[in-house]
């Protein structure tokens, strides 16, 4: 098992930052999903880790082995990083059969033929590709092509597996099936994996942790439950779930802090709640009593300390959100 460490990694194109001083650790055997909209820098970050793109600055290491460090002038080529990479377009050789595609990384390393045969057979069985060995890529379904692509990435026994939106071209039913297959194989191999996606449901379904990116910046990392229930910004809250917005007005209430009032309810916030917050929000995923307890336990500066005069039937939708904008604070 391998741990991936990234420290203050940056990459710009024509002075536009695609990756902006990102620090991130992926623990041994963990599946981390990097979630964000198109253009947020997810794929660029993956390319920097793999050695396809050279960062401008920062540090990348697997365990204690440096892959890139601008201060030490280290920049290992992709073939020496021991990283498996699955591209969004699969990138299978169209003139090679399944068995040849899977074997190719070992062949160019001049691995003995018997070792290649043994390793290919193992992966054919693991990915349920029996009977498809002599087919060409155009004779395979999307899911079969994806399994071949992942098998090829794993045949060199990499330390880290990188998946760049591998399910984006599959239909909904097949996508769900492949989510299960990827997670099952990742756990069986105990392989440290980064899975890039813009699909919130996909990230929530398979990841141990999620890292949310936007405009080249890492906004928040946490478990799927933490990301959904304790978002640290309005963007994260909005991106991981559908929101309805209700406007409220703030007024100072002496030693108790601020009171938020709306036609449906009033809510009390502590004195410190708004010092760093531009917006105050909560994501009730069930009934009022349950959510009130969660709000009281939250440590976020955006957290509602208590909620009053709120009928339970206002929380009938699991995706319902309340956003307060403190423009009226004096």
Image (cartoon, rainbow, N blue to C red):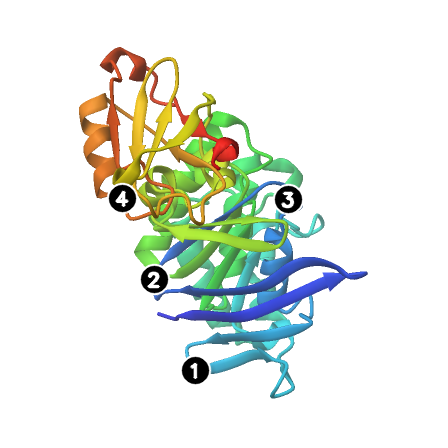
Q: Pointer 4 and pointer 2: residues touching (CB < 8 Å)?
A: no
Q: Pointer 1 and pointer 2: residues touching (CB < 8 Å)?
A: no
Q: Is residue 6 left or right of residue 291?
A: right
Distance from disc 1 to disc 2, alpha carbons, whole Å, reads: 16 Å
Residue neighbourhood size for the residue with mark 1, other residues' Cα within 10 Å, grouped as few (<14), some (14–19), many (≥20): few
Residue 182 position, x and y percent, is 41, 46
Which residue position holds label 3?
Answer: 136
| N-term-proximal mark, 3 vs 4 | 3
As helix, strand or loop, the secondary structure at mark 2 comes to loop
As helix, strand or loop, the secondary structure at mark 3 comes to loop
Which residue position holds label 1?
Answer: 64
Foreground label between 2 and 3: 2
| N-term-proximal mark, 4 vs 2 | 2
Height in image: 121 above or below 173? below
As helix, strand or loop, the secondary structure at mark 1 comes to loop
Q: Residue at x 36, y 65 (%)?
A: 27
Which residue position holds label 2?
Answer: 29
| N-term-proximal mark, 1 vs 4 | 1
Q: Residue at x 26, y 27 (%)?
A: 307
């Amino acid at each position: 098992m391998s741990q991936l460490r990234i420290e203050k990694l940056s990459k710009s194109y024509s002075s536009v930052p695609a990756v902006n001083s990102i620090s991130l650790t992926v623990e041994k055997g963990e599946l981390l999903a990097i979630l964000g909209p198109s253009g947020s820098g997810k794929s660029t970050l993956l390319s920097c880790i793999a050695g396809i793109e050279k960062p401008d600055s920062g540090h990348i290491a697997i365990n204690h082995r440096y892959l890139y460090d601008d201060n030490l002038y280290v920049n290992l080529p992709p073939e020496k990083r021991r990283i498996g990479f699955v591209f969004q377009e699969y990138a299978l050789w169209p003139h090679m059969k399944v068995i040849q595609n899977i074997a190719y990384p070992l062949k160019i390393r001049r691995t003995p033929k018997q070792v290649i045969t043994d390793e290919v057979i193992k992966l054919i069985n693991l990915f349920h590709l029996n009977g498809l060995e002599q087919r060409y890529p155009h004779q395979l379904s999307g899911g079969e092509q994806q399994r071949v692509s992942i098998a090829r990435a794993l045949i060199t026994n990499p330390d880290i597996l990188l998946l760049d939106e591998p399910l984006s071209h599959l239909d909904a039913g097949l996508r769900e099936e492949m989510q299960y297959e990827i997670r099952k194989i990742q756990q069986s191999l105990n392989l440290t994996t980064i899975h890039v996606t813009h699909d919130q449901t996909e990230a929530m379904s398979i990841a141990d942790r999620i890292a949310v990116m936007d405009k080249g910046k890492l906004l928040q990392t946490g478990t799927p439950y933490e990301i959904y229930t304790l978002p640290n910004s309005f963007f994260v809250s909005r991106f991981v779930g559908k929101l309805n917005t209700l406007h409220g007005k703030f007024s100072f209430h002496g030693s108790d802090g601020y009171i938020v009032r709306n036609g449906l309810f009033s809510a009390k916030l502590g004195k410190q709640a708004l010092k760093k917050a531009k917006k105050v929000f909560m994501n009730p995923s069930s009934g009022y009593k349950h959510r009130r307890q969660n709000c009281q336990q939250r440590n976020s500066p955006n957290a509602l300390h208590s909620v009053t005069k709120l009928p339970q039937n206002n929380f009938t939708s699991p995706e319902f959100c309340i956003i307060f904008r403190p423009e009226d604070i004096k």
